[in-house]
Amino acid sequence: MSSLLIVDRDDALRSEVARFLHSLGHGVQEAQEYPEALRLAGEQAFDLLICQVPAGGSPGELLRAARARNPGAALIVQSEPEAEGEGELALQEGAAGLLAKPYSLPELNFQVRRALEGGARGRGAPGLVERYQNVYRPYSFIGESPGIKKVFEIVERVARTDSSVIITGETGTGKELVAGAIHYNSPRAGGPFVRVNCAALPEQLLESELFGHEKGAYTGAHVSTTGRFEAAGEGTIFLDEIGELGLNLQVKLLRALEERSFEPVGSARPVPLRARIMGSTNCDLAALIREKRFRLDLYYRLKGFAVTIPPLRERREDIEPLLAHFLERYRRRYGKAGVEISREAVRYLKGYPWPGNVRELKNAVESAVLLSEQTRPLLPQDFLLEGPVESLPELWRQERDAIIEALHRAGFNRSVASRDLGMSRKTLYNKMKRYAIH
């Protein structure tokens, strides 16, 4: 998480910018006047300062104060239309970027990301974490392999459009991160980014969750409720595990996309659909279409663009930068700055098959850091990995086989399979993730 300082006399604009940057995962502080900013920069280490051209002060002075605490600190200057000359002077004094008011939130996001990447490059040091601070990563997405760079390129291209998107990839590859990267680099970045897990709720509840319902629409509907589509407003709604939608809901979603409006459950009142739609799945949608379990017309309506994320085992070049990223995150979270990863452990982790992909890697690093005594570097056995499917304990392998068999019997209908197995739908979903069942 980067530490940012926003300096602006306009309270409304400063608060809006701070909320937006906080939503991207940054730590944000605010200052109204230049003297207060100069004091804070001298007392705390900031990665980036976003400052209005100061009256009676110098951007260069503020940047020097910040770099005394953090040599990699960067500065972006905001300039009023009538003060373009002062903005150019700020660039000459070392500012990393210039934002001419009024500016859009996507433009701000681009400038912030570029400035932080430049600052990270300037901090270079030999450790595992520091070696990978300069990896290009929209919305916390990290990687340097050809496969992930291709995903980055598609994200940049798709973000400039308003088309619907389908994101495919195995469980744990980061489909939600890609959706977030598209949203926060798009003209809709100032609106909500609303996530819905289509596999986590039964169909009736999911319909109400998506479209809302009127009071009395069904038993237990004591009050009217706004659905996620309406709550998304001018932002983006992300439908995770869209392959789990029942056919009835697919019809309603298709109609909403075609007519750009929908009706809450129990109502004939049309509500405009203003949000952008993105969906993701770890299923083979082509197979579901052949089996008549996913509508072809809905697939084409959703597939304005398709993004496929390669599994971690196919982009092993990304394992080390991901290790560095998660190591730094959890060292800070748990106050264990002295934790390091041994070369032996790095070699072991780079050779591991990662059936759970990046999510499994993240969880492995978190548990290793949390349990570490910091008296020695982390070793392979500290990561508590279950090994590939072949090496799972016998009981776990039997459970995995039973789940696969039940899913096949139920035609991969998770509701039916969970009933056959005597477990809740959510438990089945979690076990499928654990055993990398797609």
Image: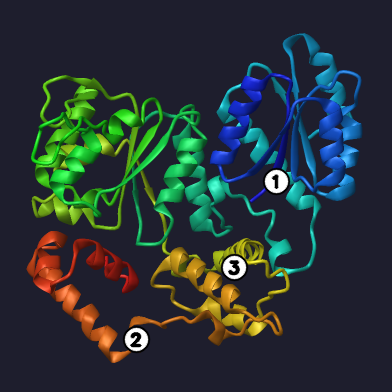
Q: Secondary structure at mark 1?
A: strand
Q: Position of residue 336 (x, y in %)?
A: 68, 70
How many tags in the picture? Answer: 3
Nearer to the camera, 88 or 272:
272
Q: Earlier in the sequence, mark 3 or mark 2?
A: 3
User: What residue is at 82 percent from the left and 39 percent from the top?
Assistant: 40
Query: In the image, is 307 to the left or to the right of 49?
Result: left
User: What residue is at 92 percent from the left and 33 percent from the top?
Assistant: 61
Neighbourhood count class around disc 3 (C-alpha, 10 Å): few under 14, some 14–19, many 20 upward: many
Query: In the image, is 211 to the left or to the right of 328?
Result: left
Q: Secondary structure at mark 3?
A: helix
Q: Amino acid at mark 1?
A: Ser
Residue at which label 2 appears = 392
Q: Is residue 49 above or below residue 373?
A: above
Rendered image quadrant of residue 23:
top right
Q: Secondary structure at mark 2?
A: loop
Neighbourhood count class around disc 1 (C-alpha, 10 Å): few under 14, some 14–19, many 20 upward: some
Check contact, mark 3 vs mark 1: CB within 8 A: no
Q: Amino acid at mark 2?
A: Leu
The answer to whether residue 291 of the structure is visible from this angle is yes
Q: Amino acid at mark 3?
A: Leu
Q: According to the image, what is the colour scheme of the structure?
A: rainbow
User: What residue is at 66 percent from the left and 40 percent from the top?
Assistant: 28
Q: Position of residue 238 (x, y in %)?
A: 35, 41
Residue at which label 1 appears = 3
Q: Position of residue 15 (x, y in %)?
A: 62, 27
Cα distance between the residues tagged 3 and 1: 21 Å
Cα distance between the residues tagged 3 and 2: 23 Å
Residue at which label 3 appears = 323
